[in-house]
Amino acid sequence: MRRFPTPAGAIGIKTWIGFVAMAVGMFMAILDTQIVASSLPEIQTGLGIPLDRLSWVQTAYLMAEIVAIPLTGWLTRVMSTRGAFFVCICGFTAASLACAASASFWSLVPARVVQGFCGGALIPLVFSAVFLMFQWPARERAILWAGLLAMLAPTLGPGVGGFVTDHFSWHWLFLINAPPGLALVLLAVFLASLQLLLKEAPQRGWASTPMLLLAALCLVCGGSTIRRALCRPMPLVDLSAFRDRNFAAGCWFSFVLGMGLYGATYLLPVFLGLIRNYDALVIGGIMMVTGAAQLMMAPIATALERRADTRLLTTAGFALLAIGFIGNGFMTLQTDFWGLFWQQIMRGAAVMLCLLPTTSLALGGFDPFLVPNASGLFNLMRNLGGAIGLALIDTVLYQRTATHVEAIVARLQAGDASAARLVGLPTERFTGAPISAVDEATRALVAPLVERAGLVAAFNDAWLMVGGLVALSMLALPLFRAPRQTVGTRRNDPDLSRIA
């Protein structure tokens, strides 16, 4: 006999304790990305990682998350929500210890893959639990608690990461995951090859033979995955949720939000470390502004969602997010805390206005049995957006830096005083007349300054690109329609007590 979620008045303390434990696991998974972000320059130095491979520290985690998230619905069917959570939290803890023990780039990356796979499943499990374990008004309280923990992670993450790295070492960034943790082939190949393609293509060239072969593998496996998902009566990943227009539109905006979130989390600490030469503690303090804005906006966004049209809130959120990114597209060599402050405030406030209404529109109308699968797909799109966003950012940084350096050199040779000022050179010799050949000592002195200025210009291009893509994504807002009470049809009629 089917048992639906317990009525609000009958929800006991054991249910709440179980849900809070799951939410804490989600908190640790989100925190892990944030605390590592602020210490990327320290990890690079500690393990001797080349700059062109530094983003693998985040990409490896993200790649595994992308594989794990769509499997969440299947995991809950096989092991129940409770069993899946237990297995994932144990795996996340063990992988965190392996990350802390890493002595090289090649030992860190595999551990990050395992950590990302287990951590990636924790987030949609909590999203599912909100809808499966509670009904209104208890569901509203559960959303508030989960939302607070989800927002607290990015608020504390950069500062905690900077403090831990500055006072101990970056290894402890992963060890702090241990105490809370202790108290399928086609899909995997498709998503892993896609992530590998997005990461490597900017350096190796999109048209190179290895990348073309990898793209072919991705297309074949992806096409086979979709075909099997649509043709099988009980597929590993059920794509039928995309038949609902609100869910499909919500996934699109989840994709764009992921591009913005992961893009900013990568661009900001790398800029502060490479250009401003700040240590992890200072970087963490600067990045806390975004998390603080998210935290302060959380209760406001929750209240607005109950009173305003969710479609209007989504519009406001993504417009504010685009403005925050575009505002960062005018950085200089001197940009510091206050030069980044208001842009971080706007992006942080925008996240809650983007996340809450799109989640409600995308998942709010599904039958309880369909929520785990839909939640996994919804969260997958956010991480997939982050993966593609990082690939685009890497492409811009690697290609545009060289272009800007060439342009700055040409301006300097032409005697452009504004170019000299941009680089940080005295302007007395730059009178608008071409400069004669310089000696090797001068060239060696000027080259790092020019490269640094060219990299800043490439960072600006990346910020503007992401902001422009977020703005263009708003053309899809008319796809949203007024939410319905329930959508979808069960494939069978199982005992829901195994899920919730």
Image: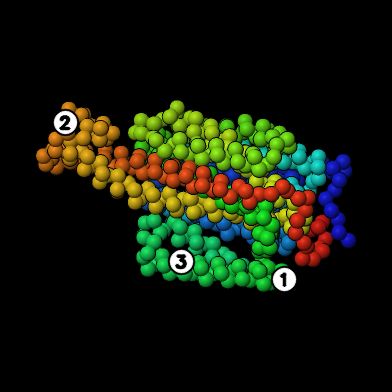
N-term mark: 2 or 3 = 3
Asked if 340 appears above or below 60 in the picture, the reply is: above
- Location of residue 330 by image quarter: top left
Can residue 495 be seen?
A: yes
Pick whichever, 10 or 364, lies toward us. Answer: 364
Name which residue lies at 39% across and 52% down. Answer: 395
Asked if 220 appears above or below 294 in the picture, the reply is: below
Q: Position of residue 268 (x, y in %)?
A: 45, 39
Q: CA distance from mark 2 to mark 3?
A: 51 Å
Residue 241 located left or right of residue 292? right
Residue type beneath disc 2: Thr
Can residue 101 be seen?
A: no
Residue under label 2: 431
Query: Element at badge 3?
Result: helix
Q: Quadrant of the N terminus?
A: bottom right
Residue 436 located left or right of residue 88? left
Q: Position of residue 400 (x, y in %)?
A: 34, 48
Q: CA distance from mark 1 to mark 2?
A: 75 Å
Q: On residue 215, which mark appears? A: 3
Residue 249 located left or right of residue 132? left
Name which residue lies at 44% across and 36% down. Answer: 328
Q: Residues within 10 Å of mark 1 (few under 14, many from 20)?
A: few
